[in-house]
Image (cartoon, rainbow, N blue to C red):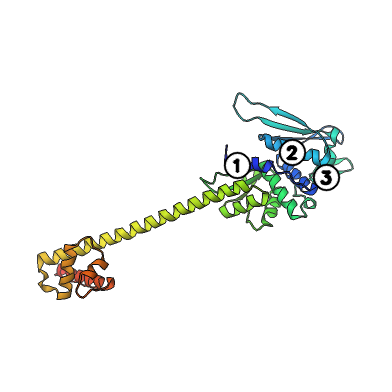
Amino acid sequence: MSFSMKTKNELARIIPEDRCCQLAELSALIRMSGTIQLMGYEKVNVKIVTENAAIARKIFTLLKKCFGIHTELRVRRNKLLKKNNHYVIIISGNVGANDILEELGILKIDNGQFSIDYNVPSELINNKCCKRSYLRGAFLGAGSVSDPEKTYHLEFVTSSEEHSEGLKALINTFELGAKIVQRKNSYVVYLKEGDKIVDLLNIIGAHLALLKLENIRIVKQVRNNVNRIVNCETANLSKIVNASLRQIENIEYIQKTVGFKVLPDNLREIAELRLNYKEASLKELGQMLNPPVGKSGVNHRLRKIEKIAEKIKSQ
């Protein structure tokens, strides 16, 4: 089961206690995954389709709690393509689909004329708890979150530009910095930063998913830090080895051409130590001198030897 599916299953078990929150969540669910069918004069049917049985049960429960109706539930099987079952919930005009859609802020009815309001219904999200519920319903209806092991990405897909703008504005009331991108005929409201996705999961109540994502983020961060340290140490070790090889090459060149007699006593001493202890660090070489010299002092002497070698080569 995918991370997104586990998150939705967790959210599907949350049933808000207050009717205002139930209405907000149901409004988002129907708006994101429902279709309206005209059924004759001043009558409509609503069809809600989902592949998740837990979400279908939740819609059924919310409709019963909010409006006291029992809706028709159908299961479509697709054996040929071996895909998941589709659960279809139908709210017919006979049980008051018109009134339900009007109360949910989806349908406007004026003198028998129907029009769909694509905006986020402001009258249903006056309270912070209702805003959370609306976002939860929107995620259950047409949201998804990527496997955090691979990437950080959470999105809501809607067919309406007006609704996508309203959804983005609602998300950003929590200062999450959501953005919109058009994908074919759909509008995608998305978050790509791990910490923002964590905040949104907390807002909509997906606490188990949040903890799992945070654990994965910590492991990835530790892994990245270890890799960074190893790479840094490897780079430093490479520099040290290259510098040591260059120093030894210069010292051996002086020894073979003019001999150490051209070197002052302090430089001859460090040159001999460098040849005898090729793998020693500058600090270790400095401690072998009498009197001992610090790392910077040893480096200074070796640089002088390098200049002498360069001068001999240029003659």
Residue 138 against residue 233 in the figure, above or below: above
Q: Residue furthest top?
A: 80
Q: Residue furthest right?
A: 111
Residue at horizontal 57%, vertical 44%?
146
Q: Nearer the viewer, mark 3 or mark 1?
A: 1
Q: Is residue 232 left or right of residue 256?
A: right
**Amino acid at dot 1:** Ser
Quarter occupied by the C terminus:
bottom left
**Amino acid at dot 3:** Glu
| Mark-to-mark CA distance, 3 and 2 | 16 Å
Name the residue beneath numbered marker 2: 59
At which x and y percent is residue 196? 60, 54
| Mark-to-mark CA distance, 3 and 1 | 30 Å
Under tag 1, what secondary structure? helix
**Amino acid at dot 2:** Ile
Name the residue beneath numbered marker 3: 103
Residue 297 against residue 232 in the figure, above or below: below
At which x and y percent is residue 264? 15, 76
Q: Mark 1 or 2 closer to N-term?
A: 1
Name the residue beneath numbered marker 1: 4
| Mark-to-mark CA distance, 1 and 2 | 19 Å
| Closer to us: 66 or 283 | 283
| Closer to us: 288 or 51 | 288
Q: Is residue 191 left or right of residue 310?
A: right
Under tag 2, what secondary structure? helix
Under tag 3, what secondary structure? helix
Q: How many numbered circles are shown?
A: 3
Q: For label 1, count other residues whose C-alpha is less than 10 Å away and answer few (under 14), some (14-19) or many (20+).
A: some
